């Protein structure tokens, strides 16, 4: 899995990793649909963002997410919009190729991404490592405004993406390939104070742990390195 996550990995390695992690899924058409989504998104994502697809899909495969969720996760990975000219995909094309549920999930994910941008630009507490109570309250209110079974499904995908983004950032910081700045500290604070509690609310223990661990590794990289040495590895 991890060789395929390498940003220099090939699409063939990525598809092999997807096929492996979805080996228990039936019918085979499910795996083929996810691989098709991965191939499409691969062509449009910057090289450094391609690993995010595999990291998010791994989280969702462990949850036994359904096929539309997996396809939507692949088509929405990275910072590009899920739909539109930059993504090379319009809603009607998604509906024709993958079904209306996938299209609906992508619309929901774009709305959640817009909410996240609103929170990030809202007045804070002045310290990038800590969100103000106002920011936390605003985030929880906006992200849970329409809590139904359908919106919960899109929120699960959103949280899987956030866990993937935080994990990739933490690995690159640890490797010395990404400088730590206020933007990353703010993102890590959201991981700890907003995304992890939401994952807990939805009963997503594994994603909650991933969010908290990756956020800690970003905020306190030296302490995380010390812990890794004590525990004998990452």
Image: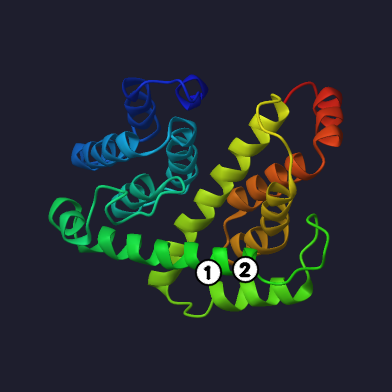
Is 231 displayed left or right of 95 in the figure? right
Question: Which one is nearer the viewer's eye here, 59 or 179?
Answer: 179
147 or 105: nearer the eye?
105
Q: CA distance from mark 2 to mark 1?
A: 6 Å
Q: Which residue is at 67% across, 36% downward? A: 170
The dot on residue 119 is: 2
Q: Is residue 226 left or right of residue 169?
A: right
Q: Which residue is mark 1?
A: 115
Is residue 7 in view from this perspective? yes
On screen, 216 above or below 96?
A: above
Q: Is residue 24 visible?
A: no
Within 10 Å of disc 2 (Cα), the crowding (few <14, some 14-19, many 20+) is many
Residue drawn at (75%, 22%) of the image: 233
Q: Quadrant of residue 153?
A: bottom left
| Badge number at residue 72 | none
Colouring used for the render:
rainbow
Tag 2–tag 1 contact (CB < 8 Å) = yes
The answer to whether residue 103 is left or right of residue 225 is left
């Amino acid at each position: 899995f991890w060789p395929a996550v390498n940003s220099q990995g090939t699409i063939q390695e990525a598809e092999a990793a997807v096929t492996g992690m979805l080996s228990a899924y039936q019918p085979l058409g499910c795996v083929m649909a996810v691989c098709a989504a991965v191939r499409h998104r691969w062509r449009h994502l910057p090289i450094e963002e391609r690993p995010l697809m595999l990291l998010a899909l791994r989280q969702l495969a462990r949850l036994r997410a359904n096929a539309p969720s997996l396809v939507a996760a692949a088509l929405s990975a990275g910072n590009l919009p899920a739909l539109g000219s930059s993504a090379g995909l319009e809603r009607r094309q998604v509906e024709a190729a993958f079904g209306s549920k996938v299209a609906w999930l992508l619309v929901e994910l774009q709305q959640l991404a817009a909410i996240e941008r609103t929170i990030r630009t809202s007045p804070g507490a002045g310290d990038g490592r800590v969100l103000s109570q106002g920011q936390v309250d605003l985030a929880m209110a906006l992200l849970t405004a329409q809590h139904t079974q359908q919106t919960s499904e899109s929120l699960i995908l959103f949280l899987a993406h956030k866990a993937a983004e935080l994990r990739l950032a933490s690995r690159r910081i640890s490797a010395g390939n990404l400088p730590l700045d206020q933007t990353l500290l703010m993102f890590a604070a959201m991981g700890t104070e907003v995304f992890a509690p939401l994952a807990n609310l939805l009963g997503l223990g594994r994603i909650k742990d991933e969010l908290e661990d990756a956020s800690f590794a970003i905020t306190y990289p030296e302490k995380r390195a010390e812990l890794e040495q004590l525990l004998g590895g990452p």
